[in-house]
Amino acid sequence: MLTRIDHIGIACHDLDATVEFYRATYGFEVFHSEINEEQGVREAMLRINGTDDGGSSYLQLLEPIREDSAVGKWLKKNGEGVHHIAFGTADVDGDSEAIRGKGVRVLYDEPRRGSMDSRITFLHPKDCHGVLTELVTSAVPGPPGGAQGH
Amino acid sequence: MLTRIDHIGIACHDLDATVEFYRATYGFEVFHSEINEEQGVREAMLRINGTDDGGSSYLQLLEPIREDSAVGKWLKKNGEGVHHIAFGTADVDGDSEAIRGKGVRVLYDEPRRGSMDSRITFLHPKDCHGVLTELVTSAVPGPPGGAQGH
């Protein structure tokens, strides 16, 4: 069951400048940053609020590290903006299989590694009214703001 | 202070079909629906989760009722997808003035009426790394899931 808006993924050309925009304009701080080689992105997670399923909602700022990454190609075509949205679930495997069974294309055969050691998959935007949609199960459920940020 | 992801605004051609997609695929239900004549949209709010500031996070599905509305023009240019993101605050007036003072263009002189009698304004996407960004103060703060839905 999808129990929260986990994050909004935003593609940008310059991660440091975009992080600084969100900090200076709204006061949002970086909770976690990493490079995901498989996804081809450098990213920063800005934690916005806690959610009533014990998780959190984030903005995920994404800068491609390769032009031929999915985000790199998207950015070249669309320019900066919202790249995807993500719903949190305790069971990404079960939920993605159930959704696949309804005829929605799931992009990975098995969930892959996402931010902060989460497990993620994506649904095809053409099957989701134009919205690239991610499903994510956090590595560390429970109350937010703990030791997972670094 | 912006204390939550209030909603993700998604533009669609057919509100009923899109509502049905979100219900059948994920189990999300309509919490509230209305026509906003000023914004030129018919919309449905799907409540996804509660937030730790006492509010909620929603998907806001938007179908233009006029081709020359902002959402109608956007949809014609971009097709279905994420139209804007919205942050919740207890003080949309103060926050939007503070943000205007930092050089970000605020699209309304004064906040206007949004979903469920909220007060809203928008920030220019070109000043926000490509993201049309809404600020919203709910009419009814406090615990979600109460009598405001209909």
Image (cartoon, coloured by chain):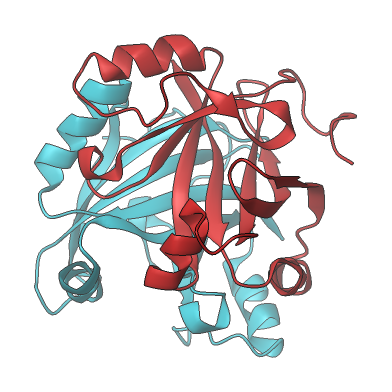
Chain colours: A cyan, B red
- Rendered view: B131 above or below A108: above
Q: Position of residue A22 (x, y in %)?
A: 26, 31
- Could you say which is closer to the camera, residue B140 or residue B57? B140
- The image quadrant that residue B65 belongs to is bottom right
Q: Going by the image, does A140 lie left or right of B17? A: left
- Could you say which is closer to the camera, residue B97 or residue A135? B97
- Rendered view: B40 above or below B92: below
- Rendered view: A128 above or below B91: below
Q: Going by the image, does A114 lie left or right of A76? A: right
Query: Looking at the figure, which quarter contains the C terminus of chain B?
Result: top right
Q: Going by the image, does B59 lie left or right of A60? A: right
Q: Which residue occupies 30% across, 19% down?
A: B99
Q: Position of residue A129 (x, y in %)?
A: 56, 75
Q: Position of residue A83 (x, y in %)?
A: 35, 62
Q: Which residue occupies 49% across, 38% down?
A: B86
Q: Going by the image, does B56 lie left or right of B69? A: right
Q: Position of residue A118 (x, y in %)?
A: 43, 57
Q: Is residue B53 visible?
A: yes
